[in-house]
Image (cartoon, rainbow, N blue to C red):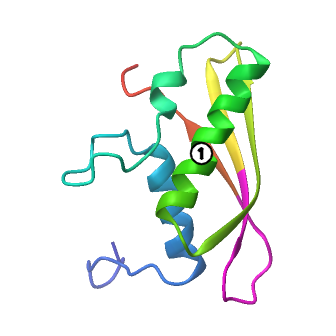
Amino acid sequence: MHPITNDLMVLKNEDAIKRSVINIVNTVIGEKPFLNDFGSQINASLFELDTSLHYISIENQIISALNNYEPRIRIDEVRVTIDGENNEMSAQISYDIIGMDTPTQDIDVLLLPARI
């Protein structure tokens, strides 16, 4: 909300794409009406065992979801880190925006279970 007008603020350019990336990663498959395969299966992976195959699987799920639903970016790297002591999992996503002369965008997405 805008502090003076109380209108919703419009996201543009890099901010809009960043919000889109975060929404795609955090959306559970089947959650969005009429787009049953939109999103990722990350939430189903949050309670799996901590193995190297688990990291690769989550990274591949994120890459696949972003390649399918965000055509404005080219993914450079996805790294998943799991902090077992704090029960947290995060993904660091680096991407370039296609058609814009901007530096590589880096975002950190904290992956949380749907139920705590």
Asked whether 42 or 107 is in front, the reply is 42
**Magenta span includes 96:** yes
Q: Which residues are magenta?
A: 93-106
Say whether residue 110 is left or right of residue 95: left
Say whether residue 40 is left or right of residue 30: right
Task: Give residue 75's position: percent from left, percent from top.
Answer: 71, 61
Q: What residue is rendered at 46% in x and 53% in y? A: 24
Total marks shown come to 1
Asked whether 94 or 8 is in front, the reply is 94
Q: What residue is rendered at 30% in x and 76% in y? A: 8
Task: Give residue 74's position: percent from left, percent from top.
Answer: 69, 68
Task: Give residue 93's position: percent from left, percent from top.
Answer: 70, 53
User: Residue 109, relative to residue 42: is it above or below?
Assistant: below
User: Residue 52, relative to residue 40: is it above or below?
Assistant: above
Say whether residue 103 is left or right of residue 12: right
User: Residue 10, relative to residue 55: is it above or below?
Assistant: below
Quarter of the view holding residue 27: top left
The kind of residue on which mark 1 rests is Ile
Q: Residues within 10 Å of mark 1 (few under 14, many from 20)?
A: many
Q: What residue is rendered at 37% in x and 50% in y? A: 38
Q: At numbered mark 1, what does the secondary structure look like: helix, strand or loop?
A: helix
Quarter of the view holding residue 107: bottom right
Q: Is the N terminus in the top left, top right, bottom left or bottom right quadrant?
A: bottom left
Task: Give residue 94's position: percent from left, percent from top.
Answer: 75, 59
**Residue denoted by label 1:** 62
